[in-house]
Image (cartoon, helix red, strand yellow):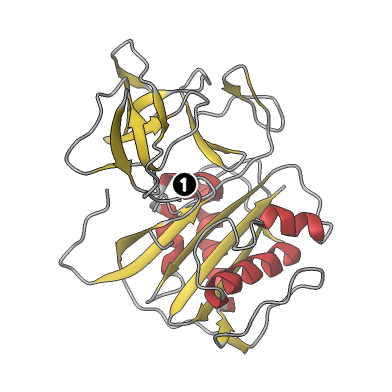
Amino acid sequence: MMKNSLRKMVTAVIAATTIGSFSSLGVSAATLDSNANNKYNTATHNHLNKGWVMNHGRWHYFDNAGKMQTGVIKVNNKTYCLNQLGMMETGKVVVNNKEYTTNSDGDITGNTTPVVDKVFDSNNNVVKDNNKTSTVSTSTNTNGTTAGTGSTTNVESSKNTTNASTSTSSVDIQGLPKLPTNYSISVQASAEQKILELMNAKRTEAGLQPLTMDNTLVQVARYKSNDMIQNNFFDHTNPDGTKWTNWLQDIGYKYTTTGENIAYNTSDPVELFNQWWNSPGHRANMMNSSYNKVGIGVIFGNGKYMGSQEFSN
């Protein structure tokens, strides 16, 4: 769990279509790759993904052999609950007939945690195997968080940068519903570019190809950020039940794999990058070798900087 610091902090929220109303794995990756025989293949089918993988809007965890995990696992000293389909549970969860609470990142919260079946290190290596698999299911007492939303975290602000912005009253897209204008907004264009530069520097350092800013994805990302501002929500699923994937289909955008990261804070638009980078799920989206295009949309409105990243190939 994230803990508060007495140092200067900024309120921030991140979400991923993985994990993560304003709460955190604050990162999302929704892929359209194949998931069969408990092994997850990339779109190119030339290697197995390992670690956390977002598939059909839900997070799964795969060991270094590419095998999907179920039950209770501990990764980097955080405990997660995976149901029999391998999907990470959030909110109220039942493990071996006992109820526990997890945040929107899937981390167990509170003083009581279930017995772990398997422990993994940061490189997805098994460091302890108790040779059992717990039974995990969603609690019928639904007072917890919803998968696909982010949670509030405190992120240290190293600096308060000045970012050029473009005032506008609309970032609507032809073919998509017109958004309300409950709040005035401004597009943080320079922050969008800086986030792209920071992300591509990390990809290049890791030997990956840099992402190209795609104009259509930029429009969708800005539309998503404004949608969350105007309609006062923070989730990968919109109030009408649609997602960014529905929008891409509605405007005729072609892709075979796509993902989304969302985040917000009240202090610094460029800090959105650090929020995503410091979250394993969101970082996985930004470093996904299957993606070669991105749209970044950072909007200021209603007292917050709202950011969205839309990925595709």
Identify whether 228 is placed above or below 112.
below
Q: Is residue 195 visible?
A: yes
Q: How many marks?
A: 1
Q: Is residue 52 visible?
A: no
Tell me the residue at 23%/33% (across/down): 113
Tell me the residue at 68%/33% (across/down): 33
Tell me the residue at 73%/59% (across/down): 247
Identify whether 8 is placed above or below 73.
below
Q: Amino acid at mark 1?
A: Ile
Looking at the image, the residue that sits furthest to the top is 131
Q: Which residue is mark 1?
A: 19
Report the side of 86 relative to 10 (left or right).
right
The spot of residue 239 in percent (x, y) is 59, 63
Q: Nearer the viewer, residue 202 or 27?
A: 27
Residue 129 placement: quadrant: top left
Looking at the image, the residue that sits furthest to the front is 140
Q: Nearer the viewer, residue 133 or 196?
A: 133
The spot of residue 260 in percent (x, y) is 59, 53
Which SS class for mark 1?
A: loop
The spot of residue 57 in percent (x, y) is 58, 43
Tell me the residue at 75%/42% (across/down): 256
The spot of residue 51 in percent (x, y) is 47, 31
Identify whether 217 is placed above or below 232.
above
Q: Nearer the viewer, residue 165 or 79?
A: 79
Binning the other alpha carbons within 10 Å of mark 1 as few (below 14), some (14 to 19) or many (20 upward) gives many
Looking at the image, the residue that sits furthest to the right is 252
